[in-house]
Image (tube, rainbow, N blue to C red):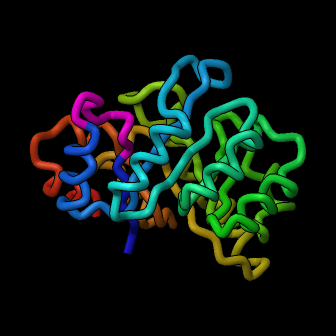
Amino acid sequence: MVKIAPSLLASDFTKIAEEIKKIEKAGADILHLDVMDGHFVPNLTFGLPIISQIKKICSIPLDVHLMVTNPEDYLEDLCGIGVEYISIHQETVFHLHRQITVIKSGKSKAGIALNPATNVETIFPILEYLDFVLLMSVNPGYGGQKFLPLVFDKISKIKKYANEHNIKIEIEIDGGVNNQNAPQLIKAGATMLVAGSYVFKNADYKKQIKSLR
């Protein structure tokens, strides 16, 4: 079954603890956290101290998406906090295998995130070392953007390569996900769906999560 990962970026920041408990009760599988540095993307969000506090009160796995220019500076600390999923952007890392090794040695699941304009073929040489791939279906940096259908072709290419090389990989989609495109994404091969505004901007979180499944 597909995993639903609401993005805390779209929540009410004045009630983070309450929002987390509500999203857990609503049936979320994973809590998605976008870490932004104001350099790689034009926004600022969570830092390590806040993630550490969130981990203490959250009963579902954390999925930290590092939208930063220096992800290597975060990895050991995130693993130490106990973050279950960590993704770094291919566009920011010179030595992907080295950083993937750091994540996996810290007992976290390692993923590579790709911007919409980045070809999926660029990560094929390292795909066998990954636990998941995060495909951006919007340009990263802000919530509430329109879904980019080009992600479907990327899913197909990853599935084809993985099948040909007997690689088991999860495919996560982030950006503009809603109940209209979720069935198509799941059918195409997506196994994890990130949804921010679609879930948090509706009063009934449970209904929204159920509609994505």
Q: In this picture, is 84 found above or below 35?
A: below
Bounds of the magenta segment: 7-15
Quadrant assignment for the N terminus:
bottom left
Q: Residue at x 54, y 48 (%)?
A: 64
Residue at the location (79% across, 78% down)?
Answer: 165
Front one among 202 and 61: 61
The structure residue drawn at horizontal position 57% and vertical position 67%, both measured from the top left corner, is 170
Up/down of 9 relative to 86, above or below: above
Q: What percent of the width, then of the height, locates residue 73?
A: 74, 39
- Image location (x, y in percent) of residue 96: 83, 51
Side (left or right) of 15 relative to 134: left
| Image-quadrant location for residue 92 | top right
Q: Is residue 70 left or right of residue 63?
A: right
Q: Please state the horizontal and vertical placement of residue 7, each as a whole percent of the image.
A: 38, 44
Q: Is residue 11 magenta?
A: yes
**Is 115 situated left or right of 181 in this image?**
right
Q: For the stretch drawn in magenta, what is the main secondary structure? A: helix
Looking at the image, residue 14 lies above or below residue 29: above
Taking the spot 59% from the left edge, 52% from the top edge, the residue there is 134
The image shows residue 81, relative to residue 175, as above or below, that is below
Percent position of residue 99, x then y: 80, 53
Horizontal placement of 13 versus 41: left or right?
left
